[in-house]
Amino acid sequence: MKLVVLGTLAFDSIQTPFGKAENVLGGSATYFSLAARNFSDVGIIGVVGTDFPAEHLNFLKSRGVDLKGVESSPGKTFRWEGYYEYDMDQAHTLKTELNVLEFFKPKIPEEYEQCDYLFLANTDPEIQLETLEKIKPKYSFCDTMNFWIEHDKEKLTKLLKKVDGVFINEGEARQYCETPNLIQAGRRLLKLGPKKVIIKKGESGALFFSEDEFFAAPAYPLETVKDPTGAGDSFAGGTIGHLAKHGEFTDYWIKKSMICGSVISSYVVEDFGIESYKKLTQKNIEERYETFKKIVAFDHKI
Ligand code: AMP
């Protein structure tokens, strides 16, 4: 397996100014794998409860996502409930129910061990650390969110010291680094250990920091954003999926792959939940990649 993701499979209830969706398929691993699968093979490590319908698992399978690492546990599936106001970059959490995640001990299928890329998507940092230690991938990235910064900052810091790269959104980068300035936050995160830091800025794109590079990827200029849920995980999935396909952990490839991540997340936010993934084609991806080239092109002479 080239790429493995550890994260949540969830029931999401979402409200935005443009509508709502209740108890729909969501979760960090769900969005990540659906995005990554456009470029690379991908397997999930996660847990669902006995209430998780076969229909959701079949949908992921039909997209070619490997589910050998998904365990079914007695109890209820992880649930997240949130809403967005007109500032769609800010998710407001109403409820997080950990349910089966609380007692989850990941079992790693043999073929996931020593994978090329491991993405430790947003979940309990204790589980992220444990999985990283067991899998020993060539390259690892992690993500997190305010819930875990507030509940287990110590473990999260331990994790950040061990991964090769981090994806974090701007609010959480400010919160974790205790600074309002994102450039300072990016540099502080680099100092902790990860060699590549990507700060996600929603409709303003994403920033990339490494020892030698700074890069700002724009977001696709969309006129319709219905539901931003999953945009961050889809961005990471598109980026790392594309990276896994080409296999090079270099600044050059990360910058190129970030544009692929931006392309995928631009489609996801146009509809609720995972709906956009049901119709996304390779041609759609290529078309928006071409548009991105135009957005960032300018005359190099002043
Ligand atoms: P994002 O890509 O950042 O919009 O993440 C969206 C997904 O994260 C949703 O589908 C939620 O199910 C999931 N999620 C929300 N809160 C948590 C949490 N504390 N831990 C793990 N996953 C979460």
Image (cartoon, rainbow, N blue to C red):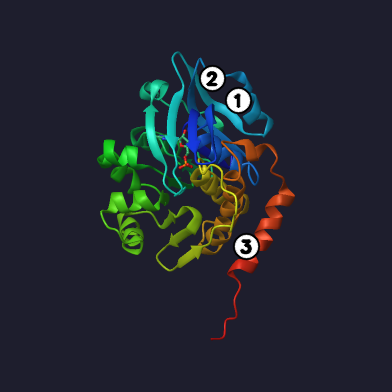
Position of residue 203 relative to residue 54, above or below, is: below
Label 2 or label 3, whichever comes before in sequence order? 2
Q: In the rendered image of this protein, does residue 179 appear above or below residue 26?
A: below
Along the horizontal axis of the image, is 129 left or right of 232? left
Q: Are marks 1 and 2 in contact (CB under 8 Å)?
A: yes
Q: Secondary structure at mark 2?
A: loop
In the visual, does 241 lie left or right of 203? right
Distance between the alpha carbons at the discs numbered 3 and 1: 32 Å
Task: Say which amino acid is labelled 1.
Answer: His
Q: Which residue is mark 1?
A: 56
**Which label is found at residue 292?**
3
Q: Residues within 10 Å of mark 1 (few under 14, many from 20)?
A: some
Residue in the picture at 29% in, 45% down:
157
Residue matched to label 2: 52
Question: How far across and down, in percent of the image, does residue 201 sit?
Answer: 45, 55
Q: Residue shown at 56%/48% (left/top)?
A: 225
Please state the quadrant of the image where ligand 1 appears.
top left
Q: Residues within 10 Å of mark 2 (few under 14, many from 20)?
A: many
When the figure is inspected, residue 45 is found, relative to residue 268, above or below; the finding is above
User: Does the CB distance between marks 2 and 3 fall below 8 Å?
Assistant: no
SS class, disc 1: helix
Tell me the distance, in whole angstroms, between the alpha carbons under discs 1 and 2.
7 Å
